[in-house]
Image (cartoon, rainbow, N blue to C red):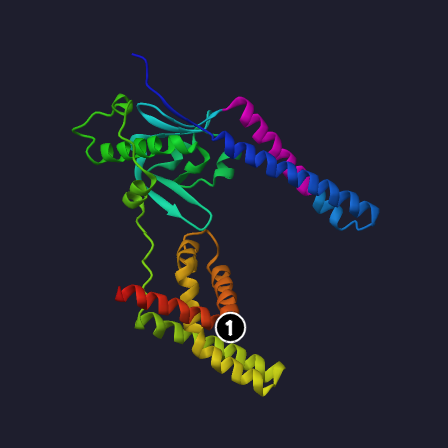
Amino acid sequence: MKESFMRFYYSKITIIMLIIISLLFIIFSICVMYLGIIDQAFIVVPIALLLFGLFTYLFGVNVLALIRNPPYIIFTETFIQLGKKGLKIDYNQIDSLYISQGVFTLDIEIVVSNQNKIYDQVSFSNEIMLGSSDRFQIKYKLIPKSERPKLFKALDYIMDWKEDETSNSFSLSKLKNPSFLSQQEFVDKYDYNPPVKLSIDKFYFLKTFGSSFLYFLIFFFYYLLLVKNVFYFYYIIVNFITFPFAKALFDWMGVYKIRQRIDNEPFPDYHYVLLKMIFDAFIYHFSIFIMPFSLLFFLIRKIKRLD
């Protein structure tokens, strides 16, 4: 009997965008190399040369992908294959599936039970590049938008079969005309760390006033060591009061959601803490100027609640 397949290809629009971006960086690196040689700024020339080599390689890879149009994901009756000659993951090796959300990414993570069996299929160099992990990512945004609901349904069907594989036989033929699964439905089902809804209440302000006190101490030491201006001292005292209201405005505008997504990014923790402190310190330092907009926001919020 002929085996069934479901193939998902790379989005041509995404590939064309990557080609354009690579080409722009190639032109930029050539210009930097030319100016560096003319001005005898030989420190920047090797950096520009490295950029030229990197983006020339990416340009070539994406052009070949556009011409050859290889499949990104292949579903068979027994396994998922990532790439035309990529890794094969047997359905019975899949332990779980979940959504990994970040600021710039929203990937599907497949967790397997025996990664050594999977890595036996690939060369040692590819295993090093892949990291020999028990988790494999599907970057679903690389496939056309119209095909994504079908991908979500196929993955959901596999996980439903895994829950009760003893009584049901797996067959891709059941997905010939599937009832598609939207992205939101898929995320709601497989995101085990969903974003917490923003609640601007007394507990929010108590917590933010604690942060405000920390930034006040930082700027107070800055005042003692460098500024030594009485006006600046009163300025940071007023900002201590206005910071929670200014921060609430930014969080309501979407910063709160970005903070939660950054928590899922693979950044070192200290990098995230440092970036967060710098951003919040910036809000603190200018919160007195943001305060009128914050008051307007709370006024509108109050009127809407009364309605």
Which quadrant holds residue 95?
Answer: top left
- Give the total of numbered labels: 1
Quickly name the residue at label 1.
289
Residue 45 at x, y = what percent? 75, 46
Residue at the top extreme of this rendering: 1
Q: Is residue 267 above or below residue 214?
A: above
Q: Secondary structure at mark 1?
A: helix
Please state which amino acid type lies under the numbered disc 1: Phe
Q: Position of residue 287 (x, y in %)?
A: 49, 72
Residue 211: quarter of image: bottom left
Task: In the displayed orientation, state which residue is furthest to the left.
Answer: 167
Q: Is residue 24 left or right of residue 236?
A: right
The quadrant the N terminus occupies is top left
Look at the image and say whether residue 72 sits in the magenta stretch: no
- Coordinates of residue 291 in the picture (x, y in percent): 46, 72
Front one among 155 and 298? 298
Query: Residue drawn at (59%, 34%), measured in percent from left and top?
Result: 19
Q: Residue at x 31, y 69 (%)?
A: 201
Q: Residue at x 51, y 70 (%)?
A: 281
Characterize the magenta stretch by its predominant secondary structure. Answer: helix
Let me know if residue 135 appears in the view: yes
Residue 91 vs residue 118: left or right? left
- Residue 124 visible to the viewer: no
Residue at the spot 34% in from the left edge and 54% down from the top edge? 195
Q: Position of residue 212 (x, y in %)?
A: 44, 75
Task: Specify the quadrant that holds the C terminus.
Answer: bottom left
Q: Residue furthest bottom?
A: 230
Vertical arrangement, residue 300 with respect to residue 55, above or below: below
Q: Which residues are magenta?
A: 50-69
